[in-house]
Image: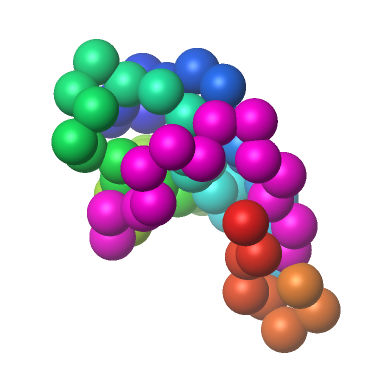
Amino acid sequence: MAQARYLGQVVSLHDGRVLAVGGAYDDPFSNPGEIYSSATGTWTPTANGIPGIDYMPATVLADGRVLI
């Protein structure tokens, strides 16, 4: 994981990757999500998320989108 986080959410995506999003960081103005691929063993950043989503649930919808 490129950016350590706590109080965030982690969900398994339909394709086997893992999305980590939300939580608290050392830099309060940066809130990227990250996707982990076990096939490559790497974390890839997503677009910046929404600040202040600690403790919020994350749910993968049937079409693959993630609802936070």
Q: Which residues are magenta?
A: 47-60
Q: Quick check: 12 left or right of 19?
A: right
Q: Residue at x 28, y 60 (%)?
A: 47
**Residue furthest toward the right?**
62
Residue 55 counted in the magenta span: yes
Count of all numbered marks drawn on residues in the image: 0
In this rendering, does residue 36 appear at all? no
Q: Position of residue 51 (x, y in %)?
A: 36, 43
Q: Position of residue 35 (x, y in %)?
A: 45, 49
**Which picture quadrant has residue 54?**
top right
The quadrant of the picture occupied by the C terminus is: bottom right
Q: Position of residue 49 (x, y in %)?
A: 36, 53
Q: Quick check: 51 left or right of 63?
A: left
**Which picture quadrant has residue 8?**
top right
Residue 53 counted in the magenta span: yes
**Residue furthest toward the bottom?**
63
Residue 28 drawn above or below residue 59: above
The quadrant of the picture occupied by the N terminus is: top left
Q: Position of residue 26 (x, y in %)?
A: 24, 15
In this rendering, does residue 60 appear at all? yes
Residue 8 drawn above or below residue 26: below
> Residue 1 or 55: which is nearer the viewer?
55
Please, what is the dominant secondary structure of the magenta stretch?
Answer: loop
Q: How is the image coloured?
A: rainbow
> Residue 55 or 44: which is nearer the viewer?
55
Q: Residue at x 73, y 63 (%)?
A: 60
Q: Residue at x 19, y 23 (%)?
A: 27
